[in-house]
Image: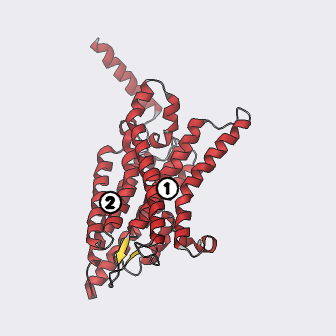
Amino acid sequence: ASVLFTTACAFGLTISSLQSVGIVGMMTVNFPAELRPIFDLLQVFVLDIDSLAFSCIAGNSAPARYTSSVLFFPAMVLWLVVCSFASRGLSAELRWERSKTCSVIGALLQVGFSTMSSISMAPLMCFSHPNGVHSLLKYPSITCGTADHAIMLAMGLLLLIVGVLGFLALCTYAVLLSPRWSAQGQHTKVRAFRFLLFRFRLDSWWFGVPLLIRGPLLSLPIALATDYPPIQVTAMSSVFIVFLALECRAWPWKVPLLNVMDALLCLIMTLLVGSTSLHLGPIEGEMKDFASILASVLMGCLGVAMAALLSMTVAALVYRAALGGQQELFFFNLRKQPSSEEVSERLKASAARIRSME
């Protein structure tokens, strides 16, 4: 694994984890007051434009603000496609290759997939008031069933069907056929989906698809059971537990340390979601203090793990020999590389055993 590869993977894993925590923060659970500012801050990673004061540009209209969020991803794809076509007028060295352009577009959609899933399901997240009226969770000023809600629902479903499910279906198709493409020498098709395959070991080339599916599965309980926090807690915990088991079984990342960090982050988020069950009912006194301390400790552990990922990114950039040589940092591979003399002796011994078998 190269330095650039490790840096990209560590950074992508950090963003994905922050998005997952941002989605957890959307749960209709009474989180401790100390954690609410952290969850509000992390809404930036699920493209909550209200947290960015975007209303100054998009206006106070909730449908306009939501439409701006929905159009962000198509606009990003369209911009790259336009740049690709414009590059055809340049020299051969500067011209964009179609397969690499597709890979860049896929990589950007992959990084923002959890965010895109959350945005597409926002119009489905209706919570009830005591008077029986329902409002949108992220846009409380919008009453469910009104004309404004219908506009937002149409935009959200379009993004869900075309952007989320369409991209997921395309990636699933590519994962199923990529072994055949490689065997038949169709390298252009493989390069077009490099973003989906290159981070994982050859025997776990498919892991990019489960990684994508996690985003929609985390948002779905909030959309379908907005008024039922216990269902949200159970469903989200189940998603994290299944994904953790799959992670430990496949151990998919090429860099061993990334496997450990990904599993650790998944475990902490499982415990964090599970700890919210303590807030499902009214609690007071020592029980309330315990629940607050537990949630704060878990959030602190999550912060430490993400800081370790960022440190890993910086180390790979600053220490250029971090990977791929005798001077590499041992913790990336979770072991010290054997010397060239030791490798040579082992190869000679293996060759001698093979020769003796003939």
How much space separates mark 1 and mark 2, taking CA atoms? 22 Å
As drawn, 158 above or below 334:
below
Q: Amino acid at mark 1?
A: Gly
User: Which sits earlier in the primary sequence, circle 1 or circle 2?
Assistant: 1
Residue at the far top: name it: 358
Q: Amino acid at mark 2?
A: Leu
Front position in the image: 310 or 59 = 59
Q: Residue 267 has which mark?
A: 2
Q: The residue tagged with tag 1: helix, strand or loop?
A: loop
Q: The residue tagged with tag 2: helix, strand or loop?
A: helix
Q: Residues within 10 Å of mark 1 (few under 14, many from 20)?
A: many
Q: Position of residue 4 (x, y in %)?
A: 55, 45
Q: Residues within 10 Å of mark 2 (few under 14, many from 20)?
A: some
**Is residue 307 toward the left or the right of residue 288 in the image?**
right
Say which quarter of the image contains residue 244.
bottom left
Name the residue beneath numbered marker 1: 112
Circle 1/circle 2 CB separation < 8 Å: no
Q: Position of residue 161 (x, y in %)?
A: 43, 52
Question: Which quadrant is the C terminus positioned in?
Answer: top left
Kindly identify the residue that appears in the image at 48 percent across and 64 percent down: 46
Can residue 334 be seen from the camera position used here?
no
Front position in the image: 33 or 54 = 54
Say which quarter of the image contains residue 184.
top left
Q: Position of residue 29 (x, y in %)?
A: 33, 75
